[in-house]
Image (cartoon, grey):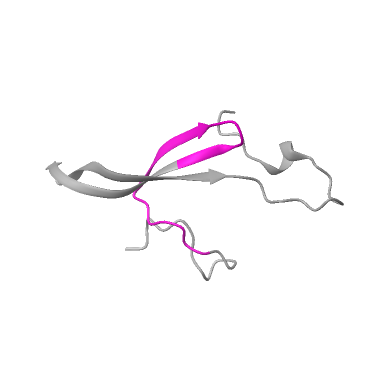
Amino acid sequence: DQSGEVARNNAGGLKPIAKAYGIVGFVRFLDCYYLTLITRRAKVGSIGGNGIYTIKSTETFPLKPAEQSPGEAADTDFHTADPSA
C-alpha cells in the first residue's frame, strides 16, 4: 500500500521520508513550522464496514524553506507556505 507515502523516488527525484496514514496537524515553534504525521495505527473496530483506528505512533518533521544562496533575493513570503492563512 503506497497511498500513505509522502514522496516517491520516481517523482522528481524525491525520496520517501515516512509512510503516513494521516496528518495530525501543524505547529509553529521559533524557527519554522512542523508537520506531525500518523505513522502507526491499529484497527479497533468498524462501523458500517468502515474501519475505526487508534493512533499508535506519530512523527514530526520540520518544514524549512530551501537554503538560498547569497545572490538570491530573500523573498521568504513567496517561498514559504503559511498553514495559518
Q: Residue furthest right?
A: 71
Relative placement, left or right, of 16 versus 41 is: right
Q: Quadrant of the N terminus?
A: bottom left
Considering depth in this image, is 10 or 33 the residue closer to the camera? Answer: 33
Q: Is residue 41 visible?
A: yes
- Number of marks in picture: 0
**Residue at 58%, 68% in the rendered image:** 13
Q: Is residue 50 visible?
A: no
**Residue at 46%, 56% in the rendered image:** 6
Relative placement, left or right, of 78 versus 81 is: right
Give the answer, above or below, for where 14 lies relative to 71: below
**Residue at 70%, 44% in the rendered image:** 79
The span picked out in magenta is: 15-35
Give the answer, above or below, for where 59 lies relative to 1: above
Considering depth in this image, is 14 or 59 the residue closer to the camera? Answer: 59
What is the x, y in percent for residue 11? 55, 66
Considering depth in this image, is 46 or 25 the residue closer to the camera? Answer: 25
Q: Quadrant of residue 73?
A: top right
Q: Residue furthest front?
A: 30
Q: Residue furthest bottom?
A: 10
Q: Residue furthest top?
A: 85
Q: Quadrant of the C terminus?
A: top right
**Residue at 56%, 28% in the rendered image:** 84
What is the x, y in percent for residue 63? 57, 44
What is the x, y in percent for residue 50? 19, 45
29 falls in the magenta region: yes
25 falls in the magenta region: yes
Relative placement, left or right, of 48 versus 20 is: left
What is the x, y in percent for residue 34? 51, 39
